[in-house]
Amino acid sequence: MREVAVIGLGMTKWGELWEKSLRTIFVEAALLALDDAGVEKIDSMYIGCMSSGLFIGQEHLASLLADYLSQVPTPSARVESACASGGLALRMGFIDVASGMSDVVLVGGVEKMTDVSGHEATYALGTAADQEYEGFHGITFPGLYALIARAHMEKYGTTREQLAMVAVKNHHNGSKNPLAQFPYEITVDSVLNSVMVADPLRILDCSPITDGAAAVVLCPVEMARKMKKPVVKIIGSGHATDSIALSSRKDITWLEATFQAAKKAYSMANKEPKDMHVIEVHDCFTIAEICVTEALGLVEKGKGGEAVELGVTSLGGKIPVNTSGGLKAKGHPVGATGVAQVVEIVKQLRGEAGERQVKGARVGMTQNMGGSGGSTLVHILERE
Amino acid sequence: MREVAVIGLGMTKWGELWEKSLRTIFVEAALLALDDAGVEKIDSMYIGCMSSGLFIGQEHLASLLADYLSQVPTPSARVESACASGGLALRMGFIDVASGMSDVVLVGGVEKMTDVSGHEATYALGTAADQEYEGFHGITFPGLYALIARAHMEKYGTTREQLAMVAVKNHHNGSKNPLAQFPYEITVDSVLNSVMVADPLRILDCSPITDGAAAVVLCPVEMARKMKKPVVKIIGSGHATDSIALSSRKDITWLEATFQAAKKAYSMANKEPKDMHVIEVHDCFTIAEICVTEALGLVEKGKGGEAVELGVTSLGGKIPVNTSGGLKAKGHPVGATGVAQVVEIVKQLRGEAGERQVKGARVGMTQNMGGSGGSTLVHILERE
């Protein structure tokens, strides 16, 4: 297998982009990435998108987007793993380049979520849960994560305030990211007094409904070395599944797919949790970030809440998590999230993250998950 | 890149499977394939499915199916390219094994289409067309293919009877396939007198709405050589895109993506059209098979209708096409179709096709396309 580098980054402003269509925002991000890479011709494309069928009545997206990017007849594939679709697209592009099948690959993530009503969006997102054992009985994602939060509080003594601190930290980081949907600070008090969604989770514990796209360009490392930018390599890729229904898991506070995907990625990269300088994780709800930091081995089991409170995962802390603002402040166009995480990490490793730069960052990681943790993609990147 | 073999085949009976759910039929096909391969442990899974979101309200399918197959935490990815989703899943599995990332890979295709009303199924299928330029204006797939048929008749003199002969041939083949949805003969008269759907296409020109699943197991050729079955290799894989809107094409009678995908597959396999002994193509409508045989270079441009009339593509003809019964008689559970094509070709190359066996077949091809030809996957297989 060949070594693979990330040579181009692109991302649109995220938010309620009512004046733009899915194809428009994808092309915007893709052109930025191709321009950043300095390439025009690509050998293949991978698109992460969760549910363009339910959100905009459009499947067959990969060909449509290849056409609008003036890239037909280039091979183009759409992949889906709920909210981990972007991370999955990255892995498919990584394997494609590593195999020798393609040299230059565009990996994009996109979702247009605000063209439907809130009720319809909740239904569409709910299709990431088990329809027979969860969805049909009325539970939606805030409810599923509320169950996880309540269990984590009960088992480990995680506090309501610690959950709030995840949102406060991520909004602090997001306030330094001009592409974020909500680039402003919030306080623990504002979280605790925001409207209840599913006890104990309040609206400021939840990532928003977002339109947005992100894209990266991959190529063999040898090709990247001839270019002018710092060479950032993908040195580890881990992908794992778990039951998508919470009721089938032994312990709902533990994200086994994240643990398994990270194990593979660490092993491939020959790295350990302590080697990471900056990390983007899937904070779809505040409790998710706490559980993820534990499953990645960044903090001890049960200590995720305490770590946030102690500032371990803050910008300037020992292991900065979600410097981009995370899903909470940057927004969460589900299929795009996993690709945008890579955009942030590569910016950090190149030293291009501006006010939110982690000084001297050379190794970073992304963790992107689907549903309540039924699928997870972990990637480790390193600057040469 | 490593050479890749197909070592296991599985397929359910296709039809209106109201008593079974999507997860049930997938597991049924997957277990048959694993059993045929003689393996239990797999390294990864790829699932082709067009729109489980719209058909059954379930995304995040890859993890769900890995769980129901008792394969978690194995990596599992769902891919979508409308009706070419199955062929795309095969290509992803092929690249995965070729790259060295995985050894044993399960590739499945599945669709459950009869749990919704006919109107809803037509809407779901319509999302393979361009929603902004086609769907929103009311046209559905029979209408799009009717436009192609009318143009082909006008330009090349293809006759209404020749269209009917495609259906008659495929039903003849399908009558020998016990897994087919409609395993019985029809006549040119019955096609010409069947109910009109979109002039000139009648109901017996159209593939049906079907529930079904198919699966194959892939591994490196060196591993396959140690097993007891004949070794069938994937020697060519081509994937290409085109605009999904008919209005953006120069000539709607010509399937450019099929031509481009075939060109790549022939080149990789170092084969020509005349080297093929048996072929499965995407006859979603009778006119589609005619256009596809031309774009694959099996017959001269404009002569696809004549070739059917002369029996060139019949069982016993020079180039037997759709010995399985094709989409027309076997059925068309959209995401499963591309995988079932491979099941048929491998059966033929192993000499296991029973009454529909093409004698001495050693090289075969599959062509699977999305929408009105906006994406195409072509694979060439050879028995060692």
Image (tube, coloured by chain):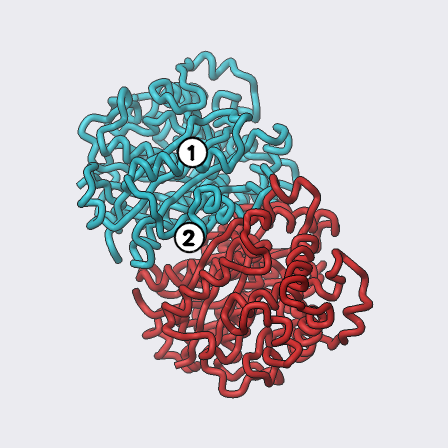
Chain colours: A red, B cyan
Instruction: Residue at 21%, 38% (x, y): give it.
Output: B275
**Secondary element at tag 2:** loop
Locate the C terminus of chain A and report the quarter of the image it occupies.
Answer: bottom left
Categorize mark 2 by other alpha carbons within 10 Å: few (<14), some (14-19), many (20+).
many
Q: Nearer the viewer, residue A291 or B254?
A: A291
Q: Can you tell which mark lies on residue B28?
A: 1
Categorize mark 1 by other alpha carbons within 10 Å: few (<14), some (14-19), many (20+).
many
For residue B122, side relative to residue B272 (left or right): right
Quarter of image, res B323: top left
How many circles with numbers are drawn on the protein? 2
**Secondary element at tag 1:** helix
x%, y% of residue B158? 41, 26
Quarter of image, res B116: top right
Q: In the image, what residue type sits under mark 1? A: Glu
Instruction: Residue at 54%, 60% (x, y): give it.
Output: A255
Q: Give above or below for A313 relative to B165.
A: below
The CA span between labels 2 and 1 is 18 Å
x%, y% of residue A98? 34, 64
From the image, tell me which residue sits under label 2: B74
